[in-house]
Image (tube, grey):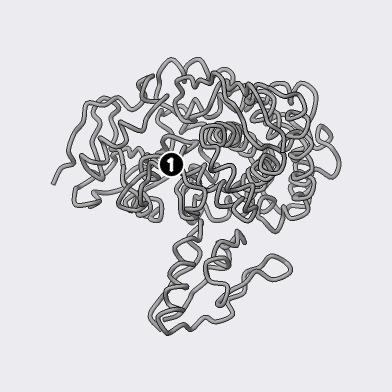
């Protein structure tokens, strides 16, 4: 059977800002919905998304992006490769990112989060995106890779552009390619001496010099850290502030039960998924949810639609910090599951914990999102008043 | 039933340990140790299934013994 069709344009400005009504409509139509306007097959339901992500033999990552230029640029990375090549590239990429590798960083990350949140609380009111959601991960990732100066100043726009260009060839992608190219250029020319001694970035060059990883791969790995690790974390930290502001009773629950910190962060990720969509290609005709996805078809995996699937989560449109949705889809799943999720959890938990410790309530003012191809993030979010704990 | 671990794929995220603390744990080096690979009994099988389900990189499997 052929999948049902919908005339939705999944990259329509309004849909990227508020995709959830569209996700509901598409999920109700089918687990796989053909979107001719975008020339792709949207995967909308939780179980099917897990099935696709767990099956790299049927669904290739070589076209994870939605335009040929970005897929070409990503060739040779673990992101865009399939097993068996993927297995080695992934091991190299994640060696410095596993929870065991990052254990030494937890104390530093917790201290930085607490200090930053304490300073913001003391001011009484603040703009949460620049001063917290962006400032914190940029600081952490700069220390991790070991750069400073102009690179640090550019990292926000570079990180945003690296995500944007994964989209289709719309104006957002075209405007972002030159900026993503600056990041690529820097990563291609960076040397060990440019990075702080003792940093993970420097360590990757040391591994290359020792022959532990292939010659020329250090720059690629750093590119993936920066391309993937900035915009996504920014989105999730902005969402933490917004959701605690909108749901004071949920903040109160975490304040009274600090053991809920990991569950609260998982629920933030489930409720507002940082990445809209991620790509795969069917390598042959594949049966998926009772329909046939033809060989060569581009899939668009709607992670946020899966995270709100009522077939999997009870009352999925309710934000509930006691739910503990450890199997949410925001880090993807399977062999390509987010390589930086250990670091993301350290950062997210540190921010949730610091807010729960220092903030009794937040009064939110204006906040808005701007249309975006891949990452769904607040552009600005005013906290008009903080009641300190 | 038997719990199988794809060792190279395991990155030590530790979600399985939270789901099935009686069956597996991360050691002092952050490496996963399956304490009871062979599981039977409703409770252990349910815990093992939960551990398999939450592994973010799909490194665990539950197979017929």
Determine the residue positioned at 69% across, 65% down.
Answer: B30
Q: Is residue A85 left or right of residue A297?
A: right
Residue with the mark numbered 1: A62
| A305 shown above or below A260 | above
Residue A387 figure quarter? top right
Task: Pick whichever, A209 or A241, lies toward us.
Answer: A241
Estimate the x, y position of residue A357 in percent, counting from the top left.
71, 43
Estimate the x, y position of residue A29 in percent, counting from the top left.
20, 39
Task: Pick whichever, B65 or A256, lies toward us.
Answer: A256
* CA neighbours of label 1 inside 10 A, class few (<14), some (14 to 19), many (20+): many
Estimate the x, y position of residue A388 in percent, counting from the top left.
72, 34
Residue A129 figure quarter? top right
Task: Pick whichever, A346 or A120, lies toward us.
Answer: A120
Determine the residue positioned at 62% across, 74% down.
Answer: B33
Mark 1 belongs to which subunit?
A
Residue A371 figure quarter? top left
Estimate the x, y position of residue A128 in percent, counting from the top left.
64, 26
Callout 1: SS: loop
Rendered-image quadrant of the N terminus of chain B: bottom left
Rendered-image quadrant of the C terminus of chain B: bottom left
């Amino acid at each position: 059977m052929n999948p049902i069709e919908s005339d939705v344009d999944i990259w329509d400005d309004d849909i990227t800002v508020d995709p959830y009504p569209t996700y509901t409509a598409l999920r109700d139509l089918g687990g796989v919905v053909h979107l001719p306007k975008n020339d792709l097959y949207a995967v909308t339901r939780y179980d099917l998304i897990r099935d696709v992500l767990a099956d790299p033999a049927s669904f290739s990552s070589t076209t994870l992006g939605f335009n040929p230029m970005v897929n070409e640029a990503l060739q040779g990375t673990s992101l865009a490769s399939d097993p068996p090549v993927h297995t080695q590239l992934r091991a190299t990429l994640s060696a410095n990112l596993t929870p065991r590798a990052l254990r030494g960083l937890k104390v530093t990350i917790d201290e930085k989060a607490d200090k930053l949140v304490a300073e913001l609380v003391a001011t009484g009111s603040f703009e949460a995106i620049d001063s917290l959601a962006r400032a914190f991960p940029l600081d952490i990732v700069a220390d991790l890779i070991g750069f400073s100066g102009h690179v640090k100043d550019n990292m926000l726009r570079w990180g945003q552009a690296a995500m944007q260009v994964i989209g289709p060839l719309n104006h957002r992608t075209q405007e972002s390619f030159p900026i993503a190219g600056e990041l690529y250029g820097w990563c291609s020319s960076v040397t060990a001496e440019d990075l702080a001694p003792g940093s993970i970035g420097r360590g990757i060059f040391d591994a290359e010099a020792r022959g532990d990883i292939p010659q020329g791969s250090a720059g690629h790995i750093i590119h993936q850290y920066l391309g993937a690790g900035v915009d996504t974390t920014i989105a999730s930290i902005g969402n933490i502030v917004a959701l605690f502001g909108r749901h004071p009773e949920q903040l109160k629950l975490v304040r009274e039960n600090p053991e809920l910190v990991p569950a609260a962060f998982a629920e933030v990720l489930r409720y507002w998924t940082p990445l809209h969509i991620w790509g795969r290609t069917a390598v042959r005709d594949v049966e998926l949810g009772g329909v046939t996805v033809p060989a060569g078809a581009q899939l668009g995996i709607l992670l946020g639609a899966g995270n709100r699937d009522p077939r999997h989560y009870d009352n999925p449109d309710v934000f509930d910090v006691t739910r503990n949705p450890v199997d949410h889809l925001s880090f993807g799943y399977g062999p390509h599951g987010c390589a930086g999720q250990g670091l993301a959890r350290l950062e997210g938990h540190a921010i949730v914990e610091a807010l729960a410790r220092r903030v009794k309530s937040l009064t939110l003012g204006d906040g808005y999102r701007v249309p975006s191809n891949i990452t769904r993030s607040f552009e600005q979010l005013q906290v008009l008043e903080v009641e300190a704990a | 039933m038997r719990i199988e671990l794809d060792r190279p794929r395991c990155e030590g995220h530790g979600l399985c340990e939270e789901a099935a603390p009686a069956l597996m744990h991360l050691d002092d080096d952050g490496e996963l140790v399956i304490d009871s690979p062979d599981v039977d009994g409703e409770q252990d099988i349910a815990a093992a299934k939960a551990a398999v389900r939450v592994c973010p990189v799909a490194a665990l499997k539950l197979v017929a013994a």
